[in-house]
């Protein structure tokens, strides 16, 4: 099989976050993890070219990126494309998924990738790619490579991967059941009413349940902090928080700040119309109102820092990691309560 490999700027050896704006480039042969893939594919297929693109550039120029990458891939007339693996890197996963979508639609060939189950690329693009489930980070590369190779070998043999070897694609497939749906539903209901064990045929999502803390007894003495996923940052976005699939959060001083103006603050968020937030960032992060509440004695004080990230497409695992670090910081500053704002 002729195979083209898509990777990001990090695995392409271009650089880290400082090179995330790297424009698409195609190179003959293998690069980075493609070396291990190519070695394991010996006798089955060969990576004839590698396309490299920065995660930020791809996601911020989506249509141009898809068209450019498709053109690069098409020139090599591949039988299959490997994208990633992206693990839990959100923007990388979204890029791999977008490559799978455009390649599948335009070239009609399979695209194999590897991602952590909570990577946003899975939810958005799973019906376009055959995604092998990987661990949370690139530390799982040794396991991801063989799994991807095994799937490629299945396609090389002219077969379709067996269920359970890939993350469910959400594609509906007709099948003949032994019993009609109404009877199966009633049987489950009877088991539930009689407290018997049963398994639903529909995969159910799992949600965290967080018990609310005790209310603040005296707001007039409480220190209140602001945390937002609405992307409010100082003008120029000094920490370069991504507009989608954020890999970081920012901590910014509120010392001497009573109002967030269009000249001093903006939103880095790419998932909503930023017009009104950029005109007056207090609409997302209400610093002005909280300053008034301090003057009026309604609350004791406003924490001297605010914390900001972008929730748009950000992986759950990343959000949990941000929350843990922010919570530790708030605890060290003896903050009594937090106001969380979004978009």
Image (cartoon, rainbow, N blue to C red):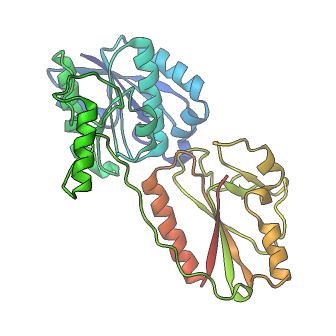
The front one of 24 and 187 is: 187
> How many numbered marks have been drawn onto this rendered protein structure?
0
From the viewer's perspective, tell me whether residue 1 is left or right of residue 321.
left
Give me the residue at 28% from left, 21% from top.
Answer: 174
From the viewer's perspective, tell me whether residue 85 is left or right of residue 106.
left
Residue 33 vertical placement versus 188 (above, below)? above
From the viewer's perspective, tell me whether residue 138 is left or right of residue 51.
left
Give me the residue at 80% from left, 47% from top.
Answer: 276
Give me the residue at 23% from left, 23% from top.
Answer: 175
Quadrant in the picture for residue 281? bottom right
Residue 265, given in percent of the width and then of the height, sits at: 78, 56
Residue 162, given in percent of the width and then of the height, sits at: 18, 29
Residue 205 vertical placement versus 156 (above, below)? below
Let me know if residue 145 appears in the view: yes
Residue 74, given in percent of the width and then of the height, sits at: 42, 13
Specify the quadrant that holds the N terminus: top left
The front one of 163 and 120 is: 163
Quadrant in the picture for residue 207? bottom left
Let me know if residue 14 appears in the view: no
Quadrant in the picture for residue 27? top left
């Amino acid at each position: 099989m002729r195979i083209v490999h898509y990777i990001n700027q990090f695995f392409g050896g271009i650089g880290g976050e400082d090179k995330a704006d790297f424009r698409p480039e195609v190179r003959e042969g293998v690069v980075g993890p493609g070396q291990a893939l190519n070695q394991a594919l010996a006798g089955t297929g060969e990576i004839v070219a590698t396309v490299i693109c920065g995660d930020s550039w791809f996601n911020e120029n989506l249509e141009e990126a898809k068209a450019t990458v498709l053109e690069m891939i098409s020139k090599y007339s591949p039988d299959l494309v490997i994208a990633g693996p992206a693990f839990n890197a959100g923007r990388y996963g979204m890029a791999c998924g977008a490559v799978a979508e455009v390649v599948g639609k335009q070239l009609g060939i399979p695209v194999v990738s590897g991602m952590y189950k909570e990577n946003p690329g899975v939810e958005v693009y799973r019906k376009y790619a055959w995604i092998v489930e990987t661990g949370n980070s690139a530390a799982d590369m040794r396991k991801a490579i063989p799994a991807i190779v095994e799937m490629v070998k299945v396609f090389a043999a002219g077969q379709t991967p067996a269920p359970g070897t890939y993350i469910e694609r959400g594609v509906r497939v007709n099948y003949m059941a032994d019993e009609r749906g109404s009877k199966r539903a009633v049987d489950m209901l009877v088991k539930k009413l009689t407290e018997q064990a049963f398994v639903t045929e529909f995969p159910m999502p799992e949600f965290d349940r967080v018990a609310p803390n005790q209310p603040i007894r005296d707001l007039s003495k409480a220190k209140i902090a602001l945390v937002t996923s609405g992307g409010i940052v100082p003008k120029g976005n000094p920490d370069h928080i991504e507009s989608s699939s954020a890999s970081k959060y920012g901590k910014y001083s509120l010392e001497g700040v009573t109002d967030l103006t269009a000249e001093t603050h903006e939103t880095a968020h790419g998932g909503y119309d930023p017009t009104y937030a950029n005109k007056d960032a207090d609409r997302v992060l209400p610093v002005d109102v909280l300053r008034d509440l301090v003057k009026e004695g309604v609350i004791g004080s406003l924490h001297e820092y605010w914390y900001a990230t972008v929730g748009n497409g950000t992986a759950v695992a990343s959000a949990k990691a941000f929350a843990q670090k922010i919570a530790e910081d708030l605890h060290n500053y003896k903050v009594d309560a937090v106001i969380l704002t979004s978009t």
